[in-house]
Each structure stands twice: as structure tokens, then as C-alpha cells.
């Protein structure tokens, strides 16, 4: 059966992670894989998550399956986190289904779209996170792109984006990242979001928000603003929520799909269809991470501690951006690197040519995506100047 299968090359990002681990250099720096790291280079277990997990392990009396749609308390907590206190009026129109991480939520959303409109087209930003394409097309959907990033100015291509959306047939799905855009770090302003959503509404497009980094840009509410604005004005919205980055629950694969329907009846139909799709893919959702997040979101003291920790992580990312920009400008006078400080979240595209990326990895042990995407959280405060000095000669 399997004799015709060929060995595939490593995933471009995960392969870099393996190469980094095998690199014996004491000076190596990993800016490739999208995980948060603290000053010591560790991806920490958040204190709130550790406390919640300890209590969960001590108190749980069963490992029985969760309900097909997931843990009820987790689903309610994620709804409030995503849509805010003002979103309560939308609850009866919103289906919330727990999923195995943000990837599971994206794929479940693709399966749901395929059931509703077989072969529908999903527009992806150019560029976007590489896994968006296989997650959407794996559900049987067609793919196309819309303009997003101007590499010369490191900014949003708003007008071309609006023109592309304005020429798109009604019913097309548009994948949007709520904040901390991966891989560019470029987010629309609120005024730009209003212009985007105005076209989405007028053309009867269906927005599918990927919210993987809520709280790591500005704050929890600001990072969800675009989603909440869309939910308040549009009849149908999909949202894939990940708890990997902002709760630090990477290996627990914790996420949820939220789908806003035109009315409560539509929401109920959506939920039953999503549950059926989930049953055919992974049957029941994993419980451990969801129950940790549920406890954090339902306990005022733990919730406050978690928000404080998350705010500290976001502040550190902003500080690292400031430091990297300043050190690049110091290493190469005349170069403007302040665009790095206008980006949000963990990622930015440096705009380096592929030979420079290879040179930095092979000669200086600095690992980044082949497209020069860097994870800002991979920097340590005491290595920023070294990295800036080595990167600066390759910048335009």
C-alpha cells in the first residue's frame, strides 16, 4: 500500500526548530518558531495556569469525555473573552464549539463552510501564516489572495485591499487576523478596520477571524476590537480562537470556534453541524487545557493574575521592538527601523533576501523564517545588540 509514498521535506518552520536544537553553538538565537519566550529563553508555564492546573488535578474525579461541543464553562468563558461584556446580547446567535487548538478551530470552520457552501472560496491575506492554506483547502475550499502588506514601507496596502474585496462575489469568505498579524506584525488601525468592514458588509462577504494572539498586541480588548465591531454589524461571522499563546497552553491544544448566525435558529443549526463535523474528525475535544482556561476565566483572583502576566508579556514584546529598532539604527546610521515599533505581537518581516537569511543562520547561528519572518519573543535583552549588528548590513 505505502510503497509509492515519497519522503517529504521537513516543514519549513519546524525544520528550522530541529536544526536549531542540533546546533551546538553557544551563541545561537532562535527567531523562527512562533512561541513566546521569556528573558531566559524559556517558554514559561504561566503562574495562573500552574495554579489552575494544580487545583484541577487535585479536584477532578473523572476523565470521562467532555460533551461534543466541549466544556460548557470554557465555552462561555471564551465567548466573553472574545466578544466582551457588551457581546452578551449576541449569545443566543452564537455557536461556540471547543476545538483542538486554533488550528483545529480553523479546520473545523473550513469543514462547516464546506457543508454550507461546497467549494466556496476563501481569501487569504498576501502574505499570511503558511498553515492557513492547507487548513482551509483541506476542508475542500478554494483559495485566493487579497493584497495586504507593502514590503517597501512595512505597512498595510489598504487601498489595494479594499479594491480587491470590493470586486469579490457575495458569499466569499475572507480570512482576517484580528491582531498581531502573522507573519507581518502589521494591523489595520480602527479607521482602516471600519473601511474594511464597510466593504465586507456592502459586498455581503463572510469574515472568518483568526484570533491567535489576543492580549499580546495592545491588550485583550483592543486586540479583539475588529472582531467585536464586525459582530455588531454583520449577520454572519466566524472566529477561530487559540489559547496557545495568551494562556501558554501550547501542548494542550486548546481553542474554540465561534460562529455568529443571523438568528438563534441558525446558531443552533450551525452548532449541530459543527458537532457532526467534529465527530468525523476527532470525535471529542481534549479536556485538560480547556478546564485550566475555564478555571482562570471563572475565578476573579486567577483571572486578574493571568491578565497581569499577559500584560507583562505584551509589554516585553513592545520593549524588545523598541530596543531592536534602536540598535539597528545605531549599527547602521541612516537606516530607519522605527517601523518595527509600529508593528504588534510576536512577528515582523525584516525584508532580507534569502541569501542573507542563509548567511545569518550558517555563519552567525541566527535562525529565522526563510522569508525573514522573525519572532521578536525569541530575542533576549542581552542579545538584541548582537542580532541588530548582524542583521543591519542586510537591510535595504
Image: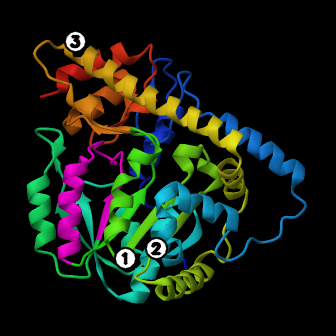
Residue shown at 26% from the left, 30% from the top = 340
Q: Which residues are magenta?
A: 174-203
Which mark is in front, 1 or 3?
Answer: 1
Q: Is any part of residue 286 visible from this angle? A: no
Alpha carbon distance from label 2 to label 1:
7 Å
Residue ID for mark 3:
331
Q: Which quadrant does the N terminus fall into?
A: bottom right
Report the Cα–Cα distance between label 2 and label 3. 48 Å
Q: Secondary structure at mark 3?
A: helix
x%, y% of residue 167?
10, 74
Q: Quadrant of the C terminus?
A: top left
Question: Where is 68 relative to 225, above or below?
Answer: below
Measured as percent of width and height from the top left, residue 31 is found at: 40, 33
- Tell me if label 2 and label 1 are in contact, CB under 8 Å: yes
Which residue shows up at 30% across the image and 42% down it?
185
Would you name the residue on which mark 2 appears? 259
Drawn side of residue 73 relative to residue 185, left or right:
right
Where is residue 232, by image quadrant?
Answer: bottom left
- Horizontal and vertical percent position of residue 359: 28, 28
Q: How many marks?
A: 3
| Image side of residue 231 versus residue 299, left or right | left
| Crowd tier of the residue under label 1, counting other residues whose Cα lies within 10 Å: few below 14, some 14–19, many 20 or above | many
Q: Is 199 contained in the magenta span?
A: yes
Amino acid at each position: 500500500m505505502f510503497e509509492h509514498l515519497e519522503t517529504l521535506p521537513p516543514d519549513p518552520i519546524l525544520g528550522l526548530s530541529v536544526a536549531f536544537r542540533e546546533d551546538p553553538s553557544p551563541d545561537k538565537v532562535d527567531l523562527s518558531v512562533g512561541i513566546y519566550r521569556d528573558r531566559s529563553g524559556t517558554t514559561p508555564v504561566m503562574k495562573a495556569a500552574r495554579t489552575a492546573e494544580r487545583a484541577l488535578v487535585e479536584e477532578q474525579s473523572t476523565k470521562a469525555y467532555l460533551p461534543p461541543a466541549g466544556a460548557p464553562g470554557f465555552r462561555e468563558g471564551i465567548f466573553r473573552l472574545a466578544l466582551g461584556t457588551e457581546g452578551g446580547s449576541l449569545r443566543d446567535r452564537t455557536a461556540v464549539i471547543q476545538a483542538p487548538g486554533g488550528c483545529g478551530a480553523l479546520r473545523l470552520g473550513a469543514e462547516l463552510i464546506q457543508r454550507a457552501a461546497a467549494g466556496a472560496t476563501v481569501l487569504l491575506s498576501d502574505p499570511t501564516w503558511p498553515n492557513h492554506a492547507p487548513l482551509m483547502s483541506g476542508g475542500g475550499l478554494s483559495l485566493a489572495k487579497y493584497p495586504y502588506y507593502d514590503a517597501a514601507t512595512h505597512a498595510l496596502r489598504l487601498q489595494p485591499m479594499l479594491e480587491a474585496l470590493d470586486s469579490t462575489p457575495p458569499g466569499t469568505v475572507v480570512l482576517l487576523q484580528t491582531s498581531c498579524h502573522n507573519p507581518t506584525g502589521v494591523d489595520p488601525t480602527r479607521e482602516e478596520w471600519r473601511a474594511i468592514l464597510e466593504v465586507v458588509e456592502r459586498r455581503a462577504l463572510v469574515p472568518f477571524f483568526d484570533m491567535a494572539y489576543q492580549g499580546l498586541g495592545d491588550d485583550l480588548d483592543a486586540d479583539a476590537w475588529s472582531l467585536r465591531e464586525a459582530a455588531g454589524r454583520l449577520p454572519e461571522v466566524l472566529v477561530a480562537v487559540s489559547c496557545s499563546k495568551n494562556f501558554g497552553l501550547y501542548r494542550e491544544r486548546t481553542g474554540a470556534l465561534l460562529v455568529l448566525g443571523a438568528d438563534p435558529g441558525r446558531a443552533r443549526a450551525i452548532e449541530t453541524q459543527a458537532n457532526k463535523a467534529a465527530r468525523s474528525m476527532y470525535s471529542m475535544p481534549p479536556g485538560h487545557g480547556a478546564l485550566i482556561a475555564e478555571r482562570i476565566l471563572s475565578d476573579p483572583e486567577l483571572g486578574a493574575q493571568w491578565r497581569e502576566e499577559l500584560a507583562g508579556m505584551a509589554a516585553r514584546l513592545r520593549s524588545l521592538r523598541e530596543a531592536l529598532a534602536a540598535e539597528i539604527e545605531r549599527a547602521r546610521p541612516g537606516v530607519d527601523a522605527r517601523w518595527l515599533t509600529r508593528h504588534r505581537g510576536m512577528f515582523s518581516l525584516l525584508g532580507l533576501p534569502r541569501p542573507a537569511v542563509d548567511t545569518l543562520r550558517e555563519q552567525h547561528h541566527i535562525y529565522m523564517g526563510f522569508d525573514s519572518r522573525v519572532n521578536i519573543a525569541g530575542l533576549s535583552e542581552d542579545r538584541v545588540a548582537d542580532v541588530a549588528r548582524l542583521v543591519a548590513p542586510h537591510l535595504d
